[in-house]
Image (cartoon, coloured by chain):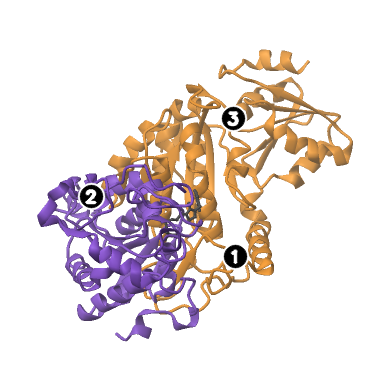
Chain colours: A purple, B orange
Amino acid sequence: MSFWDFFRRERWPHIFCPGCGIGMVLNALWKAFEETEQEPEKWAFVSGIGCTARAPAYMRVDSLHTLHGRAIAFATGLKLGNPELNVMVFSGDGDIASIGGNHLIHAARRNMDLKVIMINNGIYGMTGGQLSPTTLPGLRTTTTPMGNYDYTMGTAELVAHLGANFSARWTTAHIVMVKEAIKRMIPKEGFCFLEVVSQCPTNFGRRNRMEDPRKMLQFMKEHSVHVSRVGQLGAYFEEPVFVVGTFADRDRKGYVARLREAGYFESF
Amino acid sequence: MRRMMTGNQAVVEAAVRAGCRFFSGYPITPVSDLMEYMARRLAQVGGVFIQMEDELGAITAAIGASWAGKKSMTATSGPGFSLMQEGIGYAAMTETPVVVVDSQRGGPSTGQPTMPSQGDVLQARYGSHGDYPIAVLAPSDIQEVYDLTIKAFNIAEALRTPVVLLMDAFMSHMAEPVSEGEYEILERKVHPPGPVERPYEPGEDLVPPFPVFGRGNLVSVTGLTHDEKGVPRPEDNRVHATLIRRLFGKFERRKDLLEDVRTMGDGRRLVIAYGMMGRLAEALVDRGYRLLRPRVLWPAPTGPLKREMAEADVVYVVEMNIGKYSLVVKRVAEELGIEVHSISILGGRIPTPSELEAMME
Ligand SMILES: Cc1ncc(C[n+]2csc(CCOP(=O)(O)OP(=O)(O)O)c2C)c(N)n1
């Protein structure tokens, strides 16, 4: 599957700014699909609202661009409506961790058979760079002009605690690990979550003296610590630290299997 | 054969009969038992049931299942219905068939959880932001709950639209015999498998065939203003106007399905009432009143309203709210120069026919 087998050339140019990290993740996704010989016809992508959420519409798959925060709930219905379909959610941190946080929590708890890629650019990109629950301490956003005094949400850690089959965090500075994590998620049942910390030069870098995306990549590399060194407490750092690695990799039964056991799907 | 059913049971039986195989809900009085009954019933027919984490999830999961090709529904009441409004607008914009039951209780806010009301009659029509059409049905007895639930699915499938079935706390739990006769069941037009270039190109009836996910149609669906290819075109005024006018246009073409009223009696005093109040007002027919009882409230039955009002000297609109549907009737009556009285009943106690007649004097 070539690049243009997976993406809709006729929809180019895309809406992403120069230097945006979303393209890097899309590239990793395509490569992961390529290397594992996925057939795009067997996948459906669901997204909420935001810059990241616009990405699935550029892929040659069935895709549902939905409401702000509701991607995981739409995806839940789609998956249960046709369990044969592979369903992946691709959306932003504001969308999934803030306004959609409740659906994230409960889909992870249910071990719902979905793959979720959450691009964490630390802000709300599409609306102009406001504070997000994932903004790291001290960094500037348009609604914390003096620097962020709010505590940060460790989304991948939360998902791991809720019993999901897979949860990991990497950054675009670890793009090979991003690809490998996607490959790990593809064949797994249950809830699989990948958080990718990513650069937004336009709305984040510009306000934090990192307008050059290379500077942001450098920053992410320098401030990343592997989970094996800090454990699950990483989320409670009071300075900017990206805890990277795999937080959960289990094989509990997924929701679809449990529904079948309970007697749904088959007439009697 | 006739079976005793409560309103909530009749919804479930009729939904299953219409082919509904997916339900997502969240507990709320007076539809919790509807959901409980559905959980059992769907297991028997190979369907899927899920109790979601909230109503935002309930409506959106139902829409998601519809894109997998399933006939799907949810049910709620006042507070939950408010939470579902953004999802209902999404279904209208993306032309997703889905049925929403709103069993009305007194509001605003938590209000009167166990008491009947008709306070959501405008919210059902206009509750989501922006310009969109929607079908809203109001049964007056349990047989009609059954019949109109099937009709709700038929409209949803034929027009690719959300449909609201408006009940109330009383009707949800009242039991009456229901006969499950012959029904025409409509299915959505779907694209054959394989890539589809223009998923939003409408047919004669202005309804585009539905691209079921997972069949290689490879379509991108969005709640943004989109052209016939499904490409987002949010800044193109013409694309937006064309899309919205087509949504309204497809409703105008299906008067056969959407114009649905019952008329009784022949006095020059006309009573207009729907749902539980329609049933109450039937008792006035023997007392010399003419009755017009819309079963489809929205789109508003302008034709029948005009026809019946032309035969009347005075018009009463009886409803369990502050007088919401009377606004619709007054707009039509203005053209004819007829006086309209709003008979507004609040609090959830259903008056006797004599009490109602006294209110009209
Ligand atoms: C209910 C609702 N509230 C607010 C918005 C406005 N809005 C659009 S995108 C967005 C934030 C997107 O941020 P994120 O999910 O982090 O994605 P990004 O743009 O950074 O990729 C918001 C708040 C909306 N569309 N809907």
Given residues B186 and A19, the one toward you in this image is A19
Residue wearing tag 2:
A159
Q: Does any atom of ligand 1 lie closer than 8 Å to the CB of label 2?
A: no
Given residues A141 and A14, the one toward you in this image is A141
Residue A48 coordinates in the image, percent (x, y): 42, 57
Residue B72 coordinates in the image, percent (x, y): 41, 51
Label 1: element kind = loop
Q: Chain of mark 2?
A: A
Q: CA distance from mark 3 to mark 1?
A: 36 Å
Residue B244 appears in view: yes
Residue wearing tag 1:
B234
- At a point 83% along the width and 32% down the height, the residue shown is B312
- At a point 48% along the width and 40% down the height, the residue shown is B83
Q: Amino acid at mark 1?
A: Pro
Q: Which mark is residue B118?
A: 3
Q: Amino acid at mark 2?
A: Val
Say which quarter of the image contains residue B76: top left
Label 2: element kind = helix
Q: Does any atom of ligand 1 lie closer than 8 Å to the CB of label 1?
A: no
Q: Chain of mark 1?
A: B
Compared with residue A58, is residue B80 higher up or lower down, i.e. above or below?
above
Q: Are the residues flagged by discs 2 and 3 from a single subunit?
A: no
Say which quarter of the image contains residue B120: top right
Q: CA distance from mark 1 to mark 2?
A: 35 Å
Given residues A38 and B169, the one toward you in this image is A38
